[in-house]
Image (tube, grey):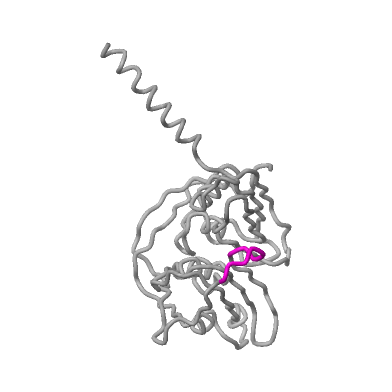
Amino acid sequence: MLKRLTLAAPLLVAFAAFAGAQARPEFEVASVRIVPPGNNSESYMQTLDVGPGGTLRISNRRLDEIIMVAYNISGRQLSGPRWLTEPTTDPTVVTRYEIVAKVPDDAKKDQIPLMLQKLLEDRFKLQVHRESRTTQVYALGVAKGGPKLETSVPNGDRPPGCARVVTGGAGIGAAADCYHITAEQLAHQLPSLSPAYFRDGPVVDRTGLTGTYDLHLEWMMQQQLDAGLTGPTMFTAVEKLGLTLEKKRDTAEMLIVDHCEPTPTEN
């Protein structure tokens, strides 16, 4: 009898592992495609605050930015191959992607990140692991006068997230409207909105704020400032919200990419 139980144990473990793998949440249907180079359409990164039966839309964004959202990390918390973590800034050659994914009607909101992670694993063969490291960060905090943030009012016609546009106007190089986002989500969005400002480390939320907010940002891109143009920096734009960005040494969780393919599999 003992021998029979011993032989059955591996089978039970294998069955449990199989059942666990089968239980991983996934989108009902999803489309992943490469956006043609040089496409100047609006760059949009939705947060993962998508309700059951809703649709997740990500438009004209790089793969590293999508991974950051899926795993709830900021810029410079991602480590991996150079083609992924150090993409060119030339808009005519940088590879960007569009994702449209339908959330099942019976899904829970905390399952959405897991669904996006699985989608990246399936379509890009993504393999990752996490490590905690002490590194250079930009700590997002609250200014002495307190935050100047507008509390978000839910609106079904406006999905949560940040939409960035390059304005080209005098004194302003880019602008972003963010809807229904938390301070933590803002910290994660900032490096995606203007990566050249945060080359030395990730942005981490140290505000202690727990609400959701609507906000507007206007700033000059770093390459414009380097060319001699004048205007508000991203740090100035953040200060107008009653927040601060302090460069310091702090602990941050790193996501290490062990393997990833730049071309997604067929839809």
Say which residue appears at 58% left-offset and 71% top-offset: 178
Q: Quadrant of residue 144?
A: bottom left
Where residue 215 sits: x, y (%)? 56, 76
Tell me residue 190's x, y (percent).
52, 70
Q: Quadrant of the N terminus?
A: top left
> Dividing the picture into quarters, in which one does residue 83 lie?
bottom right
Please state which of residues 151 and 81 is positioned toward the viewer in this rendering. 151
On screen, residue 109 versus residue 263, left or right, reads left
> In the picture provided, is 98 more to the left or to the right than 133?
right
What's drawn in magenta, residue-wise? Answer: 153-160
Q: Nearer the viewer, residue 198 or 9?
A: 9
Name the image quarter holding residue 62: bottom right
Most frequent secondary structure within the magenta stretch: loop
Q: Give the left or right position of residue 169, taking residue 133 as reference.
A: right
Residue 31 in the image: above or below residue 221: above
Residue 220 seen by the camera = yes
Q: Position of residue 216 (x, y in %)?
A: 59, 78
Compared to residue 36, the image places residue 212 above or below, namely: below
Name the residue located 67 percent from the left edge and 64 percent from the top edge.
157
Tell which residue pokes out farthest to the top in this image. 1
Task: Locate the C terminus by quadrant.
Answer: top right
The front one of 117 and 15 is 15
| Rendered view: 68 above or below 213 | above
Is 131 covered by the magenta stretch? no
- Residue 124, visible in the rendered structure: no
